Image (tube, rainbow, N blue to C red):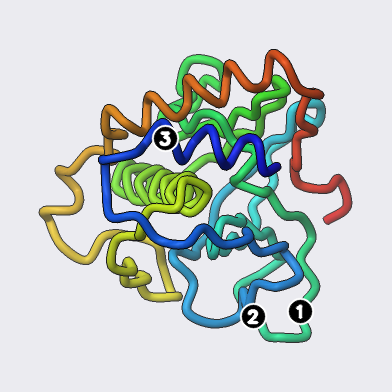
């Protein structure tokens, strides 16, 4: 809401070039079938349904879309979508899932969704890409200019194309990002709890 946006704007004053804040897009506004930030195969596990299901995921404009396969066109209907503006934390999930190459998206309301990658390289790339999308959302709410767009990996796989990527780690949030997250926490204690946009059961 406007109060949240104003508070965030004041918090990050001086930490970037100010720009006119704009309204966040809805899932229906996103052309998920073209130029995604990231796409590839992942297995997902919901908060209540603990079975792992392999699906094709597309990350774009602050949303993580889930499809049955990689043949995604404008007419393809998403089987589920996670609104990353509701996500409070992106963390490795090897301990809670028992799977080495897994990560978790946690929402302010306490909900969570887990994802399983094929290898460590994919884990690093997916966590870094999701963190970048979350950071872009926070910057937009704060009225701060975004960084140059990230070039999407090949659609055939989400694997790294160089050995350098394999040795990298998920992008760590800057200090002002951590301040924004703490501010979100404070706001959430005085506002209605957010609902988790976990992937739908069907599919």
| C-alpha gap between disc 3 and disc 1 | 29 Å
Along the line of sight, the residue nearer the viewer: 75 or 53: 75
Q: Position of residue 3 (x, y in %)?
A: 65, 36
On residue 35, which mark appears?
Answer: none
Along the line of sight, the residue nearer the viewer: 133 or 164: 133
Please give the residue where the numbered disc 1 appears in the rendered image.
76
Give the left or right position of residue 145, taking residue 83 as reference: left
The reply to whether residue 146 is visible in this rendering is yes
Mark 1 closeness class: few <14, some 14–19, many ≥20 residues within 10 Å: few
Task: Name the mark nearer the viewer: 2 or 1.
Answer: 1
| C-alpha gap between disc 2 and disc 1 | 8 Å
Please give the residue where the numbered disc 3 appears in the rendered image.
101
Q: Position of residue 10 (x, y in %)?
A: 44, 35
| C-alpha gap between disc 2 and disc 3 | 25 Å
On residue 71, which mark appears?
Answer: 2
* Residue positioned 70% across, 42% down in the render: 1
Mark 3 closeness class: few <14, some 14–19, many ≥20 residues within 10 Å: some
């Amino acid at each position: 809401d406007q109060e949240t946006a104003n508070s965030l704007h004041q918090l990050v004053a001086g930490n970037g070039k100010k720009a006119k804040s704009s309204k966040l897009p809805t899932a229906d506004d996103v052309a998920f079938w073209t130029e995604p930030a990231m796409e590839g195969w992942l297995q997902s596990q919901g908060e209540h349904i603990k079975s792992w299901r392999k699906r094709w995921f597309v990350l774009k404009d602050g949303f993580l879309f889930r499809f049955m396969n990689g043949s995604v066109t404008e007419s393809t209907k998403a089987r589920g979508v996670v609104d990353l503006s509701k996500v409070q934390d992106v963390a490795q999930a090897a301990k809670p899932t028992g799977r080495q190459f897994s990560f978790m998206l946690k929402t302010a309301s306490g909900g969570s969704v887990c994802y399983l990658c094929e290898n460590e390289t994919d884990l690093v790339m997916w966590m870094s890409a999701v963190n970048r999308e979350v950071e872009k959302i926070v910057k937009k709410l704060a009225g701060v200019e975004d960084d140059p767009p990230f070039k999407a990996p090949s659609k055939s796989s989400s694997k790294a194309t160089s050995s350098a990527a394999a040795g990298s780690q998920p992008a760590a949030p800057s200090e002002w990002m951590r301040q924004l997250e703490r501010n979100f926490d404070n706001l959430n204690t005085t506002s209605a709890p957010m609902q988790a946009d976990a992937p739908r059961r069907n599919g």
